[in-house]
Image (cartoon, rainbow, N blue to C red):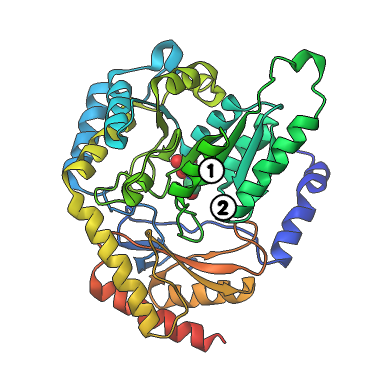
Amino acid sequence: MNERIIDIFTKDALETARANNTYRSMRLVETPESSRVKIHMPNGASQELILLASNSYLDLANIPELKQAMANAVLEWGTGSGGARLTTGNKTPHQELEEEIAKFKGEESSITFNTGYMANVGTISALCGKNDFIFSDELNHASIIDGIRLSRAKCFVYKHNDMADLERAILAAKAEFNTHEMPAENRDFSAFRGLIVTDAVFSMDGDLANLPELLRIAKENDCLLMIDEAHATGVLGKTGRGLAEHYGCAHADVTVGTLSKAVAAEGGFVAGKQQLIDFLRNMARSFIFTTAMAPAVAAAACNNLRYIDAHPERVQNLRDNVKFFCEALQREGVNVEQSPSAIVPIVIGDEARALEISAKLQNAGILIPAIRYPTVAKGQARLRASLMATHTREQLQTAATTIAQIINDCL
Ligand SMILES: Cc1ncc(COP(=O)(O)O)c(C=O)c1O
């Protein structure tokens, strides 16, 4: 191994990350994902914590009947799929899952990817090319940003949730398009093509995209509208269908989501018109050039979605918990707003202080990670609390009181 060359590629970046308090390491969790977990301590001991950091919002990962259903699927379908979806990997559970997603989302059809990250990257880079225009909220998830980069489309980043800025950006893009001299080989792209893309729930802020306004703007400007419902599926709307159910409005043209958060399995999806899904099956490289997810994972995602469908009270419990927790924090004097999603950001600002508060919370038995640059902007470090349907009121009140005390101690 040539250590000098490894140094040239890696040393500066690691030293800078350490100096900026942005160096990342992983904690080891010794128990399954649930509202209480045990983590491995550096001294070899285990520590039990209230988990306020999970994306498993409905806490489905440990429900005995769902675990049993996945175990049965392993026994029936084995441990892996053995091929890409377009070769030999497309098994009955994949098809059942896609039918279930389309039904759950109220769409004509759906297609699954191995992760939500791959769904975003594959979809955006298939839909758009270098002559197209993409309008992207400044707080969109990294997988959207990477999809845009891969597409090589011209990207306009609009201010977070600022619909006037989005409309300004579309006008600017159209003006640029009209004056732009197309290279001869691309002259068939005579019509303006624009894609508006946004998170439905912003993953570090927990706020929502304004779907009714986005639908209006997309329609008025002949743009395609894509929303990423990673943190909305199973969370928003009376039955957890997502952002359109929350607002009681129409759906976006392209709805992306993940099966790894509230659905408590793995995988990503796109739901929409049949023609869109046929297009992605043919054009999305992150769908085509990869092995299909294990059939048992597809079966688990399908069963878990059916469980959500049959248990809307779970979605309501989550919503009630979020309301209770935000009110408890406010009563304790912590500066938070009532969150419309399962994510409650407690903005601290300074990276080192956020880390210190998170570490003290951990000592006090509460796990809430500090989120820092580059995941959020510099100086916007925060505790990102996320709630589960199964947190008890006692756990949430204890957490709120402890958070308030520790923030005050660290002033
Ligand atoms: C908004 C958003 N989109 C996409 C993803 C990626 O989903 P997955 O974890 O399934 O890759 C995430 C988080 O992981 C996310 O927060």
Mark 1: which secondary structure? helix
How many neighbours does mark 1 have within 10 angstroms: few (below 14), some (14-19), or many (20 or more)? many
**Residue wearing tag 1:** 217
Q: Please name the residue that numbered disc 2 is placed on.
A: 163
> Is 409 located above or below residue 317 in the figure?
below
In the image, taking residue 259 as reference, residue 126 lies left or right, namely: right
Q: Earlier in the sequence, mark 1 or mark 2?
A: 2
Does residue 27 lie above or below 240 as drawn?
below
Residue 296: tell me if it is visible. no
Residue 176 percent across, percent down from the top left = 76, 36
Label 2 crowd (10 A; few <14 / some 14-19 / many >=20): some
Q: Residue at x 43, y 22 (%)?
A: 277
Of residues 268 and 227, the one nearer the viewer is 227
Q: Disc 1 residue type?
A: Ile
Kind of residue at badge 2: Met
Seen at 61% across and 45% down, the residue is 136
Q: Position of residue 47 (x, y in %)?
A: 37, 68
Give the vertical position of 335 relative to 139 (above or below).
below
Labels 1 & 2 near each other (Cβ < 8 A): yes
Q: Is residue 253 above or below residue 168?
A: above
* Mark 2 C-beta to ligand 1 under 8 Å: no
Looking at the figure, which quarter contains the N terminus? Answer: top right
Residue 148 seen: yes
> Which residue is found at the position 43% from the left and 79% from the top?
403
Label 1, ligand 1: CB separation under 8 Å: no
Q: Nearer the viewer, residue 203 or 179?
A: 179
